Structure formats: C-alpha cells, structure tokens
Amino acid sequence: MNPIIILGAGHAAYSLAREIRRHNQDQTITLITRDSGDSYYKPNLSKALASSKTPEQLVLKTREQQEQALNITVLAHRQVKSIEPNNQVLELENGEWLPYASLMFATGAESRRFEIAGNANAEVLHVNDLDEYRIFTDKIQHAQRVLIMGAGLVGCEFANDLHSQGIASILVDPAPFPLAALLPAPLGNALQKALTDIGVEQFYGCTVSQLTATDSGYEAQLSNGESLDADLVLSAAGLSVDTTLAASANIQCERGIVVNAQLATNQANIYALGDCAEINGQLRPYIAPILPSVKALAQTLLGNPTDVVFGAMPVSVKTPCCPVVACPPANTNGGEWRIEGEQDNLIARFEQAGKTTGFACTGYATSRAKTLQQEMA
Ligand SMILES: Cc1cc2nc3c(=O)[nH]c(=O)nc-3n(C[C@H](O)[C@H](O)[C@H](O)COP(=O)(O)OP(=O)(O)OC[C@H]3O[C@@H](n4cnc5c(N)ncnc54)[C@H](O)[C@@H]3O)c2cc1C
C-alpha cells in the first residue's frame, strides 16, 4: 500500500498523522518537511520570554520521538521538487521519486516580506518558526529597544513579551489601532492604552518607509514624517501562502491552496489543511480550525467522505497587560457592533438581523468569552 504523504511537520501535519493513526494502525504515513521535524506549539513563541523558556525547552517532541510515538517516517530537511498528480508520485530535490496514495499539503504560511527603502531590509527579523525564534532570542540579548512592524496578534504579543524582560518596544501599524482586523475601535483603543501603560510606544496610521543601519542600531523613517531609533527590527506584518509547488502541479491556488468542504484540491487525492488552505475564499491561519479539519479529513481518508464544519472559533490574544478574545463576524453586511463595559473591560457583540454573529472582549471581560461563544450558536 502506498503511503499517505503529508508535506510539513507543524501542528496540522502532526495532528493529522495522529488522527489517522488513531483509526488505522497499518497505513504507512510519511511526513516530508523542510525543517528539523521537531514539534513545538507555535503560539508559545510569542510568550516564551515571560515563561523563561529557551528555544530548546519549547520542543515538545523531537522528530525521533514523534516517529516512534506515531509509527511514522519523517523525512526532515527535505523539499519536494515536483508532483505528478496523474501518476500519484512526487520528486524530492535529490531526484528520488516517491509514490503516494494521498498527498496532504500542511505547509503553513510564510511571513509576509516587503521591500523597505534604505540599507537594512535584509536585517529585519521574522519569527514564524522555531529556527527564526532562536535567531531572535540570540539578538535580543543585546537589545534594549525593538521596533515591531505590525500591531496584529503576533506584534502585540511580542511587544508584551519583550516588556516582561524589560526590553522596550515600539509598534508601527498602518491601521488606526492595534488588532484592527479583529476588534472594533473601542476595544482596540483599550488594548492600545494598556500597551501604553506598560511603556510600549505606538504609531498608527503609518508605515516604516525607510530603514537605515547606523553605528548603534537602526534608524527608521515613518511615512508620517517621524523618525525612530531601535536596536532591532522585527516584522510581524502578516502571512502569505507560498503556492509555488502546488501551482506547479496544476492545483488551483488563490491566496492559498483552494480546497472544497472536504479539504480536497482540484487534483485527485491531493488535500490541504492548516494555514496553507483556502476554503470559500477564506484563509484560517489559527490553531482552532486544525482540529475539525483533521477529524473530517481522517474520516474522508478512511472512505467516509466528511465535510469540515468550523463553527465559531474565538482567538485568544496573549497580551497579559490587557487579555483579548476575538471572534470576528464572517461578514459585516448590515450589522453593527454593540459595546458594553468600562475602562479596559469591554464586551463587543456584532449583531446582524437580531443575532450575535461575532464578538470580542478585553480585560476581565474575557472571562465571559465562553458565554459569548454560546450566544452565537
Ligand atoms: C508567533 C506566533 C504566535 C501565534 N499565536 C497564535 C495563537 O495564540 N492562537 C492561534 O490560534 N494561532 C496562533 N498562531 C498561528 C498558528 O501558530 C498557526 O495557525 C499554526 O501553527 C499553523 O499550523 P500549520 O501546521 O498549518 O503550519 P506551520 O505550523 O507553519 O507548519 C508548516 C510546516 O510545513 C513545513 N513546510 C513549509 N513549506 C514546506 C515545503 N515546501 N516542503 C516541506 N515542508 C514545508 C514547515 O517547515 C512546517 O513544518 C501564531 C503564530 C505565530 C507565528
């Protein structure tokens, strides 16, 4: 029997291997990943400083431990060169061909990179995996002030985590307030104030237009005319899916790898899940959608075709200065936010035709997140 091959060794890949194994002890499963295959929980990367965890301590299981625990093979530090969907084979970079029964893309997403004028573009740090986190933790040993481009979930979490180590940070974002993709303005403003209170400088409605390396670090010119100094620059400006390999196999791709409700691509026996998958025009770059995806996909692979159902999936933002839980509405047509609470402790319900179709809460009000989620059912 040809193996099920899973590309990647992140949360989606290992969760799928575990779920298939739960139902089937005999099926050969091979993971092919460009990283070491050691598994870690990626959301921990932006809160590990506060918990004094080194990058090594973030590894939950080594590749060998995962291979043993799940009875699978993990080909680490390997890349796929090409896929021939009609023959159900793929070619590794070394020219070796591997047949597959089913092929799963669980290749995640890449940090979005963009050109910034000046001489320091190549020195901008990104943290989207454990190796990049190692580089980041080495560099911050000598830093007192870190410029973070992007005040979304990752940028805000790093700002708060750096503060726990006495390292100052500066957030720059083109939106009018932090977490603008997840929160209505009053809640974003509450988070902004809490970050200000712990000493995080913030610049909204502007971008870094030029970055120059100086003798002592970096000088950033902002599009609003201001200029800033920092010892390090971290980009947290979102993710984009690398669709090159999938597209080269004539798999339909848009912002991600396009899949149907059963996570199937337009090529027979090729599926995608996790950050790389696009369903109904939507990317879902969070942990929570992975569980229903692997449950449904494992059933489909066992011969019981199953649609994935996501339901309401709140995201918790790990900013201890002002915790946030957000579950934005799928669309905002004809609806509006209703907000209650005071100071940092706010609840926002998004209401459409008399129904709560999204919510967000901050501060102590995050203890109401479960109840708010139930209101959406
Ligand atoms: C700092 C940070 C904090 C986060 N915090 C949260 C949070 O609090 N809550 C939340 O819900 N989400 C959070 N996320 C997002 C969450 O971690 C991701 O949604 C999740 O890890 C995606 O899992 P994945 O398996 O799809 O992708 P990944 O974990 O990115 O795994 C992709 C795997 O594919 C491999 N790969 C990539 N390309 C190839 C290739 N061509 N060939 C072979 N292998 C390849 C990679 O090496 C990796 O092993 C956070 C993300 C970051 C970066």
Image (spheres, rainbow, N blue to C red):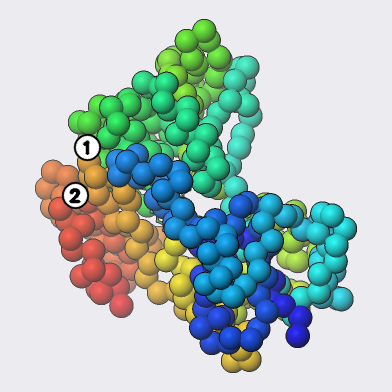
Q: Residue at x 50, y 38 (%)?
A: 134
Q: Is residue 174 visible?
A: no
Residue, disc 2 = 363
- The relative height of residue 327 versus residue 112 in the rendered view (above or below) is below
Residue type at numbered disc 2 = Gly
Label 2 element class? helix
Residue under label 1: 194
Q: Residue furthest bottom?
A: 304
Q: Are marks 2 and 1 in contact (CB under 8 Å)?
A: yes
On the image, the x and y values in percent for residue 227 come to 44, 14
Where does the image place residue 351, in percent across and percent down from the top left? 29, 65
Disc 1 crowd rating (10 Å Cα; few below 14, some 14-19, many 20+) is: many
Q: Quadrant of residue 38?
A: bottom right
Residue 360 is marked as none
Q: Residue at x 66, y 69 (%)?
A: 73
- Crowdedness of circle 2 by 10 Å Cα count: few (<14), some, many (20+)? many
Query: At label 1, which amino acid type do we have?
Result: Ala
**Cα–Cα gap, marks 2 and 1:** 9 Å
Q: Name the residue rendered at 40%, 42% in the picture.
A: 54
Q: Is residue 147 left or right of residue 215?
A: left
